[in-house]
Amino acid sequence: MKQRPFPIALLAALALAACNHDNPDARFAEAKKAFAAEDYAHARSAVLAALDGARGNRDMLLLLARSNLALHDGEGAGAALARLADAGMNGPEWNEMAAEAALWRGRPKDMADLLKDDQSPAAWRLRGEAALADNDSAAALADFQRGMAAGGADFRLAADYARFLIDAADIDGAERALAVMRNAGSDRIDTLLITGEIAQARGQLDAAGRAFADAAARFPARVEPLLALAYLADLRGDTAATARLSDQAAAIAPRDPKVVSLIVMVAEEANNWAKVRDLLAPHETTLDLRSADGLSYGAALLNLGHAEAARAIFQKALLLSQQNPYARLMLAKCDLAVGDGSGAMQTIRPLADSVLAGEQELDVAIRAATMAHDPALPGYQQRRASPQLAMIAATAGAATAAMGRRDWAAALAALRTIPGADRDPEVLKRLALAASNLGQADAALAYADHALELDPRNPDMLHIAGLVRINAGRDRGLAQSLLRQALERDPANRLFRADLARAGV
């Protein structure tokens, strides 16, 4: 068969690519273009290639350091900065980058030594990030606020502060930080993402989707917009879109832990438990069992017939986060799977006795009570068969949706109609939150204190009792004590940490 000749245009393109590959100036231009587009991984690889043919080039080393810092690669940034120091670079810019490299290398003391008495917004940002890494939200909040007060429009400081405030559910404060970001970089990826996150926090899902889609279109090499769109699609129940976006993210960064978590979630929703296990098993020893991945791994083991191993996971998860209803439900299922009816009954009872108990919780309670010959069985059977069950589920769902869009009046009205609301701590907690956001301080305090009276060791009830006092400007000392107790019982809870910081502790 006669071979077709290569098209001339293709030959020229291949020759140009080969030339660029060996041309340090061309690779450096490529790296600068990628950095400007916030494609930091591409920028790093291109500038490393450029340095192969131009070792010691100061401008290239500087771009390499900046790219590594943007990727939170402290070791790589530190190595580049050391070469820059050998080439004679020093001064405030080098110090700031070296301090950030120390931060990402987990060396806060070295960072502090490099910053010394630096009062710039950038220095306060780094101190705030170091405080967050040390789980000191109060210090982080103070550092971010000092940085914002130092003047100027520091984009990265405003972005870090905005995300801190979103975690603390201070959406109005995050909006103010976003205004600074827009002034400093209206088209940057973090501006678009935080715009979407704030819209989502306000329940404006269409606006959030537009912001995330805009970010995905403008920054096609970054996975963050795809992840945001995927979780938004999941929130809307669009599993096909979630799976499609998961595939797109995996094509860009298959080993990114956040991408792997999304793939796990999609596999779990498809009941592909073997895939969930295979993805997470290599990380079994380092999984945070309270995290979504940790709980998914336990569910996979249970569904694949390894009930004892799953039981150990959910026992630890519930010990670490006793108010987690999913961990409690799954532990009860594990108890049943190993034939421990009494254990299952003890585990499921707090969920089953709640007025918010749904079909799944009552089904597990009925199985547990049957196995354990518990006298509560007839009551659970009666509630499971009651037509009121569907009404309560619909009302609770409507209240949750209203809270998601921050329609506190609608949430309060819905919650008040749930039968038995006045004797259920979970409903009372939600009533307290809604009333507090409506400025109904007396009602919020009454709801929260009643919830705490009914469930005095639950971190959620301690937290809400402290939060409503902070929001009302009352009993600051007691509020701080309550919030501190909540965090002691659930030290990984970022919202608890942020609210404790806001209380001035």
Image (cartoon, rainbow, N blue to C red):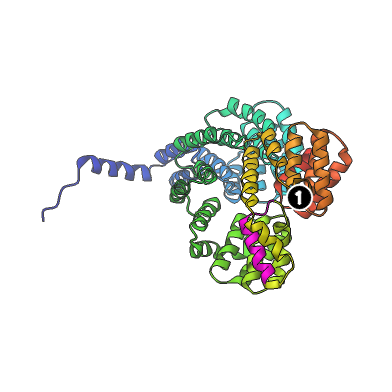
How far from the left and from the top, in percent, is residue 203? 60, 36
Q: Given the current orientation, which residue lies at the most extreme left position?
A: 1
- Determine the image quadrant of residue 1: bottom left
Q: Could you tell me which secondary element the residue under label 1 belongs to? A: loop
Residue 311 visible in the picture: no
How far from the left and from the top, in percent, is residue 433? 74, 40
**Magenta stretch: includes residue 360:** yes
Tell me the magenta residue range.
356-370
Q: Given the current orientation, which residue lies at the most extreme bottom position?
A: 339
**Which residue is at the front of the view, 144 or 410?**
410
- Using a 10 Å C-alpha cutoff, classify the residue at mark 1 as few (fewer than 14 neighbours), some (14 to 19) or many (20 or more): some
From the viewer's perspective, is residue 278 above or below residue 441?
below
Residue 497 left/right relative to 42: right
- Residue appearing at x 58%, y 59% in the figure: 296
- Residue appearing at x 55%, y 62% in the figure: 280
- Residue appearing at x 65%, y 35% in the figure: 406
From the viewer's perspective, is residue 465 above or below residue 361?
above
**Magenta stretch: includes residue 89:** no
From the viewer's perspective, is residue 156 above or below residue 103?
above
How far from the left and from the top, in percent, is residue 330? 63, 62
Q: Which residue is mark 1?
A: 424
- Residue appearing at x 44%, y 40% in the figure: 220
- Determine the image quadrant of residue 305: bottom right
Q: How many callouts does the rendering have? A: 1
**Which residue is at the front of the view, 292 or 443?**
443
Magenta stretch secondary structure, dominant = helix
Residue 355 visible in the picture: yes
**Which residue is at the front of the view, 313 or 130?**
313
Residue 238 left/right relative to 301: left
Badge 1 amino acid: Asp
**Which residue is at the front of the view, 162 or 366?**
366
From the viewer's perspective, is residue 370 above or below residue 465?
below
